[in-house]
Image: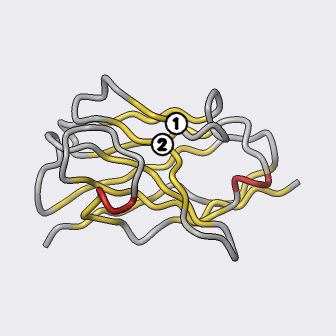
Amino acid sequence: QVQLVESGGGLVQAGGSLRLSCAASGRTFSSNGMGWFRQAPGKEREFVVSINWSGGSTYYADSVKGRFTISRDNAKNTMYLQMNSLKPEDTAVYYCAAGRSPMALMIERDYDYWGQGTQVTVSS
């Protein structure tokens, strides 16, 4: 059974940092692009950042550029999201996803596997 499990969410004050992890099991995703999406209350899920199979190519949403950093460790089958300078508007459930393509993609339909999500709450 293929699973993506996020961890590292929590409550943090504005300006603080969190590091999310996405651990994959059941198969390796070392040849697949992966990404992070988020869904705030009352809003649709939106793209945050993606990374290609090797980690050499990344795409960031403008809203997180310069504050968030995506990385991956293929040996551990794990992806990370370092979030700095957090803002209240970053409050959301964060989902990791793995795609069919080795590329870093930004569209939900390009992703086949999804985690259950982890809550990130940023207080003002």
Residue designated by label 2:
49
Identity of the residue furthest to the bottom in this view: 42
For the residue pair 13 and 81, the one nearer the viewer reads as 81
Instruction: State the image quarter where residue 121 is shown.
Output: bottom right
Q: CA distance from mark 1 to mark 2?
A: 4 Å
Q: Position of residue 85 (x, y in %)?
A: 73, 36
Of the residues under marks 1 and 2, which one precedes in the sequence? 2
Pinpoint residue 27: horizontal percent, then vertical percent: 11, 57
Q: Is residue 24 left or right of residue 108?
A: left
Q: Is 109 drawn above or below residue 72 in the view shown?
A: below
Above or below residue 27? Residue 106 is above
Amino acid type for the residue under numbered disc 2: Val
Residue picked out by circle 1? 60
Q: Is residue 18 left or right of residue 101?
A: right
- Tag 2 secondary structure: strand
**Local crowd at mark 1 within 10 Å, few (<14), some, or many (≥20)?**
many
Residue at the image position 29 percent from the left and 58 percent from the top: 111
Residue that appears at 57% across and 58% down: 9
